[in-house]
Image (tube, rainbow, N blue to C red):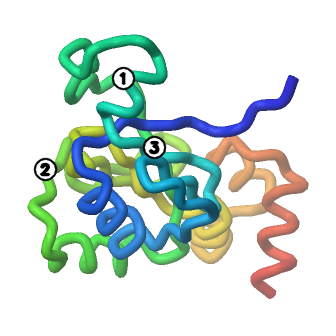
Amino acid sequence: MKYVAPCIAVNNIEESRDFYENLLGQRVKYDFGENITYEGMFSIQLKPHFAKMINLSTDELKTKPNNFEITFETEDLDAFIKKLKNSKYDVVYLHDIIEHEWGQRVIRFYDPSQNVIEVGEDMKVVCIRYLNKGMSIEETAAKTQFPVEFVKNCKKQHS
């Protein structure tokens, strides 16, 4: 068996497409009208179509369940935050930027259909930040919870 991708139900396919493509920079892999698959290997699907596929009414689909998130990473979180705050979207935030114990800074907010979105720093950027602060490869690996080999590769690619 092979894992393929998550599919999230959305209220308005055009509004959601605009949000994912123009704000989050996702590129369409397949466009089936009521279902859009992105190169990042997730899909959005119009709620009535999704409900019909799983043999439920649209009323049985939960809005804002807060039990699933779609996660994105960026090499420049600060630039993304600026883009997000200056965007045309009426974004509802779960929280502003927080830093997790492993050093990754993230922000969480809702998409137009109230699905949770997380945008965080690429972990390579986090490793480089700690290495640039003078931490050793081993200290950086311990802090970020990534293997020493990953941190060494980050350093090698950044040099």
Residue receiving disc 3: 70
In the foreground, 85 or 100? 85
Q: Could you give the CA–CA distance between mark 1 and mark 2, rounded to whole angstroms? A: 25 Å
Q: Is residue 98 above or below residue 61?
A: below
Q: Is residue 16 above or below residue 8?
A: below
At numbered mark 2, what does the secondary structure look like: helix, strand or loop?
loop
Indicate which disc, 3 or 1, sits on the residue closer to the N terminus.
1
- Looking at the rendered structure, the kind of residue marked 3 is Ile
Question: Closer to the observer: label 3 or label 1?
Answer: 1
Residue receiving disc 1: 51
Give the quadrant of the C terminus. Answer: bottom right
Q: Could you give the CA–CA distance between mark 3 and mark 1, rounded to whole angstroms? A: 20 Å
Residue receiving disc 2: 92
In the foreground, 111 or 139? 111
Question: Closer to the observer: label 1 or label 2?
Answer: 1
Residue at 41% across / 56% down in the picture? 119
At numbered mark 3, what does the secondary structure look like: helix, strand or loop?
strand
Q: Total of numbered circles in the picture? A: 3
At numbered mark 1, what does the secondary structure look like: helix, strand or loop?
helix
Categorize mark 1 by other alpha carbons within 10 Å: few (<14), some (14-19), many (20+): some
- Looking at the rendered structure, the kind of residue marked 1 is Ala
Indicate which disc, 1 or 2, sits on the residue closer to the N terminus.
1
